[in-house]
Amino acid sequence: MTGFRSLLSHVEFNVSDYKRSVLFYDLILPPLGWKKLNSTRQFTAYTDGALKIILCPTESGFEQAGFHRKRIGLNHLALVASSKEAVDDFLRDVVIPNRINLLYSEKPSGDDEYYALYFEDPDRIKIEVVCAPNYCSPSHWPNNLKNDFDPTI
């Protein structure tokens, strides 16, 4: 098949409190290089130039179940940072002054291969800010782990 690239177009979230979520994403996305494209009553869209994140208010009658990353569906959203220093800067300039609670640790963790921090949005969607320069390279973790699952068996 020709004419297609292997990129995601967009990720869309239905949120429980639209105003609160837009304010939250307005806070965390610009320091990571994202720009707000528009904000209407139906949706707010952000882009990094290759991907869009879209927030939508949840339709009436569908709010009750809520979100939990351990259920079927989205586990977390990982946003790329250009360097380990950028992850540290995000902690210093965004997380700490805005009292965003980190998950798992009070600071970023990892090494030169994978360095990240984790927190939740207002609906408890886990967000990761990560510097992992070799993450998609076949010779680097986790792509070089031994295969131990065959779905045909």
Image: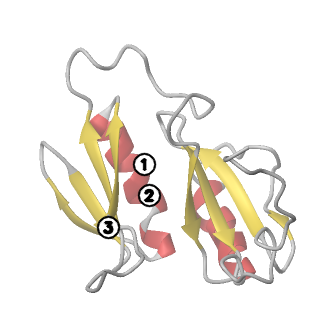
Q: Which residue is mark 3?
A: 9
Residue 114: % across, % down: 78, 71
First-in-chain label (3 vs 1)? 3
Q: Which residue is mark 1?
A: 24
Residue 153, quarter of picture: top right
Cα separation, mark 3 vs mark 1, equals 22 Å
Q: Nearer the viewer, residue 22 or 145?
A: 145
130 with respect to 51 (left or right): right
Q: Nearer the viewer, residue 23 or 118?
A: 118
Up/down of 107 relative to 126, above or below: below
Q: How many marks?
A: 3
Whether residue 33 is visible to the viewer of this picture, yes or no, is yes
Cα separation, mark 1 vs mark 2, equals 5 Å
Circle 2 — which element? helix
Residue 55: % across, % down: 30, 47
Whether residue 99 is visible to the viewer of this picture, yes or no, is no
Up/down of 77 relative to 125, above or below: below
Labels 1 & 2 near each other (Cβ < 8 A): yes
Labels 3 & 1 near each other (Cβ < 8 A): no
Q: Which residue is mark 2?
A: 27
Amino acid type of disc 1? Phe
